[in-house]
Amino acid sequence: MPDITKFYIDGQWVDPIGELNVLDVINPATEKAAGQVALGTSADVDAAVAAARRAFDSWSQSSVADRIALLQAIIAEYQNRSADLAAAVTEEMGAPAGLAKAAQVPIGLAHLMTAAASLETYSFSEDRGSSRIVKEPIGVCGFITPWNWPLNQVMCKVAPALATGCTMVLKPSEVAPFSAAIVAEIFDAAGVPAGVFNLVNGDGPGVGSALSAHPDIDLISFTGSTRAGIEVAKNAAPTVKRVAQELGGKSPNILLDDESLTRNVAAGVAAMMVNSGQSCNAPSRMLVPANRIDDVTAAIVEAAADITVGDPTSKVKLGPVVSEPQFTKIQGLIERAIADGATPVVGGAGRPEGLETGYYVQPTVFTNVTNDMEIARTEVFGPVLVVIGYDSVDEAIEIGNDTEYGLAGYVSGDDLDEVRRIGAKLRAGSITLNSAGLDPAAPFGGYKKSGNGREWSDYAFSEFLEVKSLLGFGA
C-alpha cells in the first residue's frame, strides 16, 4: 500500500494544511512499517466540514431514486476492489487472509446492500390526523471508526448516512488507514458528489477531538472504547450535537446443561477467537454448569487444538493482535489473571511457540474464574476467554448481567423456549441464540456503558434523521 499523505476533501485528494506530519503504519505480523499516513489537524477538519456543509444543501434534497442509484454504483465499485480491500485489512491490522476475504470485506458490502434495499421501502413521512410528520437528514456527520473491523465500522455509518441524505467527514483509525483510503477511491470512482464524503486521517487529539467539538457537525458517531467514547461525548456537549456511540463489551455466553453442552463449548471457543478476539461483541465470558466443569475443560482443550496461529497471509485461523500497545495490555491482563488465581487450561502469557516476531498472543482460556476478577470484568480485546461456573440458570442470568457493559449476549441449549426465555432476560442490545449468524437487517448497539443509538439495518436511518411536525398540513 502506498503512503497516504493526502486527504479526500470536496471530491479531490489534497495535501494537509500546514506542515506534513506522518505516522508509520506498522504491519503487526512483521513489526515493520508498511507505509505512512499523514496526521491531520483542526485546520484540515475545518476544510472537510466546510465542504460537507456546502454539499449538504443539494445532497439533502436528492431523490430516493438518486440515492439508491448511487449506492448501487458504490456496491459495484466495492465488489471490483474486494481483493484490494482484503489485502489492505490483512496488512494493516493482521486479519488472516481467509477471514479478510470471507468476513471483513463482505460485512462492509452487506451494509451497503442493506441500506440500498431498506431505502426502497423506507417512508420519510406519515400523516397523523391533520399533521404531517416528516423525517429530514440531520446534516453534516462526523465519523470516528476503529481498526478491528475497519470496513464494517465505516460502512455501517457511511451507508445509512448516504441513504438518508447526510454529508460526512470520516476519521478512520490511524493504526489501520489503508482500507479506508481504498473506500475513498471507491466513492470517487462511483461518482459520489463532491463534498458528500470526506476523509481526514489523524489521531484522536488532532482530528477526533476537532470533529466531535466542531460547531458545524450535527452528529458525531463514534465506535471504540468506552473511555474514549466518554471523551467524545464531553467534547460534543457544548455544541449540543447528537452523539451515537458503539462502545465496549464483556459479553456473557450462557451454555445450558444438556446433550449439546460440549458442542456448544467448542462453538463458544471458536467464536471468541475470531479476529484474534478483537471484537467488541465477542462472547468473552462463558457461563457453564458448575457440575460439568470437567466435561467443559476437556471440550475446551480439544477445541483449542484446532486453532492455528501465525502469518496472516497463510492459511491460519488467528493472526497477530493489532499493535505493540495492544499486545502489552493483553499480556498484562493474562499475567494478573494468573496471579489472581485463574487457571489457564490452554495458552497463557507469552507468544506462541516459534513466533518470536509479530504481536502474536496465545489463544488463552481461563477456568477457576469468578465474576469479580479483573479478567472477568475488563474488556481484553484479545484471544482470551474466561469460564465461570453457575449452579442455576437464574444465577447464570444474574452473572451475565453483572457487568457495566451491555453490547451483546449469547445463549445456547437444546430447549429453544428456555434459550429464548434466558435471552429475553439479558440486558444487552444484541442476543445470539444457538450460534445464529450475523444479520445486517437487525439493529446493533448497546445498553449501559456499551453505548447508545443503533447501527445496521433501517434502524440506523433514525440516527441520521430529524423529525419535523407540520401542524395543520391536512387542514
Image (cartoon, rainbow, N blue to C red):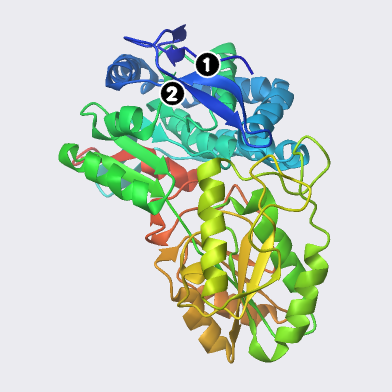
Viewer-proximal residue among 59 and 366: 366
Residue in view at x 42 percent, y 29 percent: 171
Q: Which mark is residue 4?
A: 1
425 with respect to 108 (left or right): left
Amino acid type, residue under disc 2 in the picture: Asn
Distance from the alpha carbon under mark 2 to that under mark 1: 9 Å
Q: Which mark is residue 201?
A: 2
Image quarter where the N terminus lies is: top right
Image quarter where the C terminus lies is: top left
219 with respect to 366 (left or right): left
Q: Work out whether 319 lies above or below 8.
A: below
Determine the secondary structure under disc 1.
loop
Could you tell me how many numbered marks the image carries? 2
266 with respect to 247 (left or right): right
**Residue 143: quarter of image:** top left
**Residue 240: quarter of image:** top left
